Image (cartoon, grey):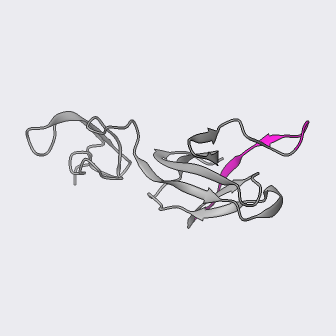
Amino acid sequence: MTSRRVIIGKYADGVSLGVKAALPGYDALAESDDSPNLSFNSNWNDIVPIIQSGFLTATAAGGAPTDLLVSSPGYVPYVDARKFEGGNLIRDDYTYGTAPTRIGVGIGWRSASPLTLSVYRLNVGDTCIYVVYGVPVVLT
């Protein structure tokens, strides 16, 4: 089978025009517009696809990690998390602790199988908003 990672021009329907790029091992021409196996599609309304998003409330004391299972796209995706204060207030400058040792909200991948996101440096009951993007990252 031919694997076309990138197509520019007509899609498989022979009418639609655009640009599609597929993840390794997938055929851009054969994948549907909303396929999670695409890394780019000029028909998307957003720049990158969102795999999962939501709110996570800290349950661990002392800033210890609170874990969340994430739908795995077959690779480790980019993630962002911010402290949610309620209403329309989201803190991207939130710090945990007291001066001079304050540190920001932490996020990280605890496990790749199953894909587990850890959010830490929040107080018990604090909530964060998180977004998992369909952009592969390399863990080092």
User: Is residue 112 placed above or below 23 in the rendered structure?
Assistant: below
Q: Quadrant of the N terminus?
A: bottom left
- Left or right of 51? Residue 63 is right
Q: Foreground: 62 or 109? A: 62
User: Is residue 18 placed above or below 72 in the rendered structure?
Assistant: above
Q: Is residue 8 visible?
A: no
Q: Quadrant of residue 67?
A: bottom right
Q: Position of residue 3 (x, y in %)?
A: 26, 48
x 63%, y 47%: residue: 84
x 13%, y 37%: residue: 16
Q: Quadrant of residue 15?
A: top left
x 38%, y 47%: residue: 23
Q: Foreground: 9 or 2? A: 9
Residue at the extreme right of the image, as rendered: 100
Q: Foreground: 96 or 47? A: 96
- Left or right of 12? Residue 139 is right
Q: Is residue 92 magenta?
A: no
Residue at the extreme left of the image, as rendered: 14
Q: Position of residue 114 (x, y in %)?
A: 56, 67
Q: Is residue 110 magenta?
A: yes
- Left or right of 59? Residue 128 is left
Magenta span: 98-112
Q: Is residue 22 visible?
A: yes
- Left or right of 53? Residue 39 is left
